[in-house]
Structures are given as structure tokens and as C-alpha cells.
Image (cartoon, rainbow, N blue to C red):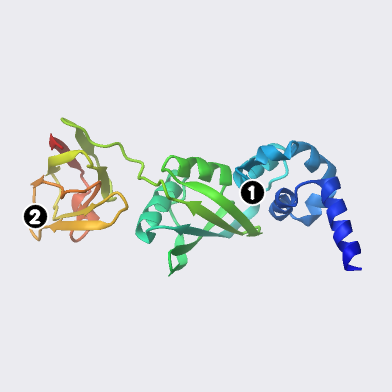
Amino acid sequence: MVKGLLFLSLFSTLLWGDPVLYEKVDSFIGKSDFAKNRSFIKIIFTPEEAYFVNDHLDVVKVVQTLKENGLMKLDYEHTQELSLTFTTSGSPTYFVKLMGDTLRSMGYYRYVTSNSRLDNSTFYWKITLNTKHATDPVDLRDELNKRGCDITDIVREDAQSWAYTIDMSKAHLKLKPLEAGDEVIYKRSLYAHWLDVSKVSRMTVWSMRGNNWYPYLAFYDSSLRLLKVDKRDKKSWQMNVRPPRDTTYVRISDLYSLKNMKDGLRIEVKEVR
């Protein structure tokens, strides 16, 4: 009996195709749609080897093919609570910063962290948001690629719950390194400002008129490990800054409230390494 089942399984695989690929397709579109479009699915995923890179399934390419052929449903009839779970290996602080920037670039400004945990070197971050559209995995990969990250796996748990595995081994913030003579002006905003100061040895920060700025500068290395904090419990109009050795990024904010720097800042590079 067991031998018969094994033979049928092998025979079915030989007739149908790679089980890894089609099991993933089935999980993305659901068993009903998979059964109704079985022959069409076989056609659009030929040749199957085009969906593998070094024997690893390119799940985002699978999603893209399904979208292009009208088989991937990412829109809801009305606003739903969408759950996104991200898994990665690396610095949790760095990952949350990267993902926050990525989500904002896609128009997701309001989300809530519903769970996060670190198991050995694996970090899990789960967020929820209200939306009429599920996050497009193709767009998400495009934005992550701009930051040196990639999607290695996707699991569609149900229509409102998706889980992503992210490779951040080559991650970097999407910032242009400041050069000699550069001047950066931030106009009105209520966000902390991040700068790539990997080449900077000295710079000056000016607070715009109308601010009540109490400087708070945090310096990080390339993996977003905190190196130093420079803060002043005194309203300031100008601050000369020498980033510590090994600094890649600096985060400029206010000791008390970002409203204190809402009229903007001006940064001028004085010396480079």
C-alpha cells in the first residue's frame, strides 16, 4: 500500500512538475483557484527552472507571474486589518529602522507593533495596519533592494496575514554619504533626521529661526550599533560636531520634543576623513 502511494506521488510529480513551486502557488492563490486554473498555471510557470536561483525558489517572481496573469488577489472589498510578520537575522534596532523606512516609502505611515521577540539570533517583528490593499510583495522587494535587503521567503497564512523572511546581510540605510562642502537643509518637519557621515570628520548644525532646539545627536556604526550620544540641556542655535571614529550614521533630534526643531535644520560639512 505504502509503495503504491509513493509511486502515485512520484508519478503525479513527474506529470505535473516541481512540487516546491506549485505548493507555493497553491498557498498564494488558494486551493479552489489553483484547481480551477491548473492547466493555465502549468503554462505560465513554464519553464519551471526560471523560478529558481541556485536551487532556491524565487518567491517574489512567483507572485509577479501570478499578478501579471490575474491570479493574485491583493485588494479587499473593504478596509481590513492586515497582519505582517517579518523574520530576519541581524540587529533588531537596525531591522526596525530599515523596515520603517521601507514601509513609509510605500505609503504605510500608521501601523502598530503587535509582537516582537528575539530568539537567539533570529528576530521576529509583527505589525498590524488597516488597509484596503494587501502589501504587494513585488513592490516591497523593490524598496528593500534599495536598502541592500531581499525577500527569501513568503508565507500567506490567510488573506489578511502574511509572513516574510528577510535577508539583511548586506543592509544599509538609503542615504547619500555626505561629502566635503556639502550643505543639507531640512525644512519644516516633525521627524528625526538621519545622515550618512561615514566620510565626515567635522560638521556644523544650525537650528532655524523659530526653533527651540535642545540638541540630541546619536552616533551609530554601519550595523546601527550605538557609539555615542551627544546632548545638551540648553537651547542651541549652533552645534559643532565631530563624529566618533567608526561612525557611519548620525540621528539628529531633540532632547524633549521634535516640535522644538519643527522649523528645520541646516547642516554643513567642514572636514572629511
Q: Position of residue 123 (x, y in %)?
A: 45, 63
Label 2 neighbour load within 10 Å: few <14, some 14-19, many 20+: some
Q: Is residue 105 left or right of residue 222?
A: right
Residue found at the very far top of the displayed protein: 181
Kindly identify which numbered label has been placed on residue 164.
Answer: none
Kindly identify which numbered label has been placed on residue 235.
Answer: 2
Q: Is residue 93 left or right of residue 78?
A: left
Q: Position of residue 228 (x, y in %)?
A: 18, 57
Kindly identify which numbered label has been placed on residue 74.
Answer: 1
- Which of the image's four quarters has the C terminus? top left
Q: Is residue 219 left or right of residue 23?
A: left
Q: Secondary structure at mark 1?
A: loop
User: Which residue corresponds to the image point at 89% horizontal and 64% vertical from the top-left?
Assistant: 3
Q: Secondary structure at mark 2?
A: loop
Measure the alpha-carbon separation of dots 1 and 2.
Answer: 49 Å
Q: Quadrant of residue 255?
A: bottom left
Q: Quadrant of residue 70?
A: top right
Q: Position of residue 93 (x, y in %)?
A: 35, 59
